[in-house]
Amino acid sequence: MKKIKAYRYKDLGQSLFEVIVALALIGIVLTGIVALSVASIRNASFAKNNAQANRYAQEAIEWIRRQRDANWDQFLNNFAPTNGMFNYCLSNLEIPLTTGSCTVFISGTIFTRELRVQRSGSTVDLTVTVSWTDSQGRRQVVNQTRLTNWRR
């Protein structure tokens, strides 16, 4: 004959301590998952904006190169009339250029694009800076190039 074991009340189920420990562990795991997700989304957003800013900077440099290739003398008149440094806002790639620092966004974007031109004799140094602001603060991408009259 089998002996039937009598259970006492304290042996049934989980104790309150076990439930609290399990809930704490679940909370720690969920907090880690949420923090990882937030960081991942922030990094993906930064990578997207950084790639877009690089594209806008390269677009400006290529546009300026086309201006140079079309007519060197006109290029110098438009971008670097005398030896020295000039700052332009390139929110739109069109002539006449807007001088000074740029607070105008590229149409439909969060980016501003500035051009710094420094002419020394027949050499023109260009620095295009594309800036934007995100949750981490002010960000920028800088592209530089040097142009000469390659046809001479």
Image: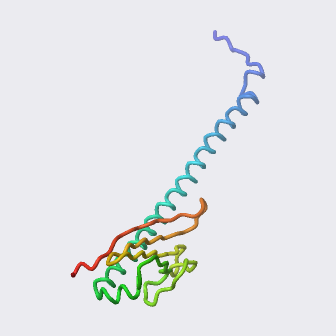
* Quarter of the image where one finds residue 5: top right
Q: How far across and down, in percent of the image, does residue 15 sit?
A: 74, 27
Q: Which residue is drawn at 54% across and 78% down?
A: 105
- Farthest-out residue, left: 152
Is 94 positioned to the left or the right of 14 in the image? left
As displayed, is residue 44 above or below residue 7? below
Measured as percent of width and height from the top left, residue 6 is found at: 73, 16
Residue 79 appears in the picture as rendered? no
Q: Where is residue 13 in the image (x, y as percent from the top left)?
A: 71, 28
- Residue lying at 46% horizontally and 69% vertically, measured from the top left: 53
Count of picture labels? 0
- Image quadrant occupied by the N terminus: top right
Residue 106: percent from left, percent from top: 50, 79
Q: Classify residue 76 by image quadrant.
A: bottom left
Q: Farthest residue in the right direction?
A: 9
User: In the rendered image, which quarter contains the C terminus?
Assistant: bottom left
Question: At 56% across and 48% down in the image, what residue appears?
Answer: 36
In this rendering, position of residue 10 left or right of residue 77: right
In the rendered view, would you say 113 is above or below 47?
Answer: below
Q: In which quarter of the image is residue 137?
A: bottom right
**Residue at the far top in the pictured view:** 1
Residue sitting nearer the eye, 81 or 23: 81
Query: Is residue 104 visible in this depiction of the protein?
Result: yes
